[in-house]
Image (cartoon, rainbow, N blue to C red):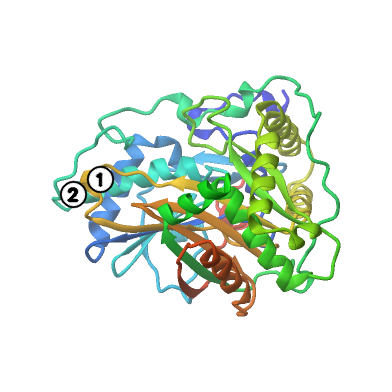
């Protein structure tokens, strides 16, 4: 019997693409994102632990840990109690999937009035994990005695898990798609001195502003919010790291596939496209650059092109996961594969969109944001919005804050007035061999 033929419980499904993250570390790619929720009152850890435990009844496919065979890392059912962990913002560092988290591939932490929630990227993508976050927050507020009601926004305990919520949605893709018209990228501009520097601390700068200001500016230019944000940041990156180079700045953009292939899955279900900022764009007005970017995105986000990218990448990741080679060799190959993939581009921009909550919860949830660690890249950006405000979290190597400052000045020139807040960041660790050391088959 081949590895791909082994029958698995629905809770233990990994999707075809997300399998690659089982074998990577935060030095390779951003395999442990962080979501931060600011509450209206100090967090009660005992109640938060109860809320997480209740959420696992609704999301049983999150009750998983890691085990290892001679050739594979894979999920195991984890029936331990979840834990909530104190955060100090920097010095205390945890390893997800180990005894730190009772083996779970997610982490829930707290500090003062903030809740932190992280996940190992094989289990989910940003949109999928937000479903779990909403359930935890709703349970927590209920247990705190707050008068919150589910308006259908939350996958709560008033509904039940279905196997489609942990399905491999890539299995719905056709056998082949056309690659015609897909952007063929040249070598991208890089900040070489800040690339692939290993396990080093990062600095996060939050750029926050009213979303309506960006929406108004984008509309006046005939652009979209993303087609404004991406070229502005790319222009800043070029000014900082390569204004004399002819190489384009190329941002890597994850795209949620659920609007194209409907699925209830909370597992990983995205593909990536490449968005160039050409050297010649420096001589153009920002308005023209934003319009060109919008046109480019529209062309590259045609379903056929996105699904070609999704099929090609997920097939590569699934084949490596199923290959009958020693585990150490597989981890090394996965590390090289993922690192080479992300380093083809200058940096990554993730847009998780609006974080939605029932109106009854909003008085108790004051702020929301997320961080995508930059890993082997010099920087990474995550765009989120909540309650009328957009927050752009820029992760970077080094303490030079020229990049977010220039980006903010470009936004200001369009009438978008920002608040900047920077802080040190230490990514939660993950590696499959450590997470599975007590579960070797």
Residues tagged 1 and 2 counted as in contact (Cβ below 8 A): yes
Q: Is residue 162 left or right of residue 311?
A: left
Decide: is 88 above or below 367.
Answer: below
Residue 329 versus residue 172: which sits nearer the camera?
A: 172
Give the secondary structure at mark 1.
Answer: helix
Residue at x-position 48% and y-position 77%: 91
Residue 350 versus residue 26: which sits nearer the camera?
A: 350
Residue at x-position 33% and y-position 27%: 160
Quadrant location of the C terminus in the rendered image: top right
Q: Is residue 97 visible?
A: no
Q: Which mark is residue 143?
A: 2
Check disc 1: other Cα within 10 Å, few if <14, some if 14-19, many if 20+.
many
Q: Which mark is residue 388?
A: none
Give the secondary structure at mark 2.
Answer: helix
Residue 426 quadrant? bottom right
Q: Position of residue 73 (x, y in %)?
A: 64, 44
Q: Is residue 265 visible?
A: yes
Mark 1 and mark 2: Cα distance apart in space: 6 Å
The count of marks equals: 2
Q: Position of residue 440 (x, y in %)?
A: 61, 47
Decide: is 104 above or below 17.
Answer: below
Residue 168 quadrant? top right
Q: Position of residue 220 (x, y in %)?
A: 52, 49
Kindly give the residue lying farthest to the bottom in the view shown. Answer: 399
Quadrant location of the N terminus in the rendered image: top right
Residue at x-position 58% and y-position 46%: 223
The residue labelled by disc 1 is 139
Check disc 2: other Cα within 10 Å, few if <14, some if 14-19, many if 20+.
few
Q: Is residue 77 left or right of residue 323?
A: left
Q: Position of residue 333 (x, y in %)?
A: 79, 49
């Amino acid at each position: 019997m081949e590895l791909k033929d082994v029958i698995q419980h629905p809770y233990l499904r990994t999707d075809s693409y997300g399998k690659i993250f089982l074998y990577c570390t935060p030095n390779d790619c951003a395999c442990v994102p962080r979501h931060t929720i600011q509450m209206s009152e100090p967090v009660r850890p005992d109640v938060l632990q109860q809320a997480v435990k209740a959420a696992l009844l609704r999301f049983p496919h999150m009750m998983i840990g890691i085990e290892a065979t001679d050739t594979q890392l894979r999920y195991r059912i984890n029936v331990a109690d979840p834990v909530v962990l104190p955060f100090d913002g920097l010095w205390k560092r945890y390893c997800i999937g180990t005894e730190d988290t009772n083996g779970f591939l997610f982490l829930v932490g707290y500090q003062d009035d903030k809740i932190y929630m992280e996940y190992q990227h094989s289990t989910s993508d940003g949109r999928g994990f937000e479903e779990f976050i909403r359930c935890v927050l709703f349970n927590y507020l209920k247990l705190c005695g707050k008068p919150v009601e589910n308006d259908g926004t939350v996958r709560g305990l008033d509904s039940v898990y279905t196997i489609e919520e942990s399905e491999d949605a890539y299995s719905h893709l056709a056998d082949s798609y056309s690659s015609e018209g897909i952007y063929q990228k040249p070598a991208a501009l890089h900040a070489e001195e800040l690339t692939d520097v290993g396990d080093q601390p990062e600095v996060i700068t939050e750029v926050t502003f009213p979303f309506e200001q960006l929406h108004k500016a984008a509309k006046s230019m005939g652009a979209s919010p993303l087609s404004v944000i991406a070229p502005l940041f790319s222009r800043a990156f070029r000014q900082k790291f390569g204004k004399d180079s002819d190489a384009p700045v190329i941002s890597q953009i994850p795209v949620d596939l659920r609007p194209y292939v409907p699925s209830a899955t909370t597992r990983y279900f995205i593909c990536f496209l490449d968005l160039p900022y050409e050297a010649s764009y420096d001589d153009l007005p920002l308005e023209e650059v934003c319009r060109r970017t919008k046109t480019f995105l529209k062309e590259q986000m045609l379903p056929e092109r996105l699904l070609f990218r999704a099929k090609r990448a997920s097939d590569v990741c699934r084949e490596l996961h199923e290959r009958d080679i020693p585990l150490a060799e597989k981890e090394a190959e996965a590390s090289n594969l993922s690192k080479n993939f992300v380093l083809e581009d200058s940096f990554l921009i993730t847009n998780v969109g609006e974080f939605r909550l029932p109106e009854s919860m909003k008085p108790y949830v004051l702020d929301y944001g997320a961080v995508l660690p930059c890993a082997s890249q010099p920087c990474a950006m995550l765009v989120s919005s909540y309650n009328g405000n957009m927050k752009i979290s820029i992760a970077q190597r080094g303490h030079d804050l020229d990049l977010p400052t220039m980006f903010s000045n470009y936004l200001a020139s369009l009438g978008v007035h920002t608040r900047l807040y920077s802080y040190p960041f230490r990514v939660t660790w993950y590696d499959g061999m450590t997470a599975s050391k007590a579960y070797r088959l």
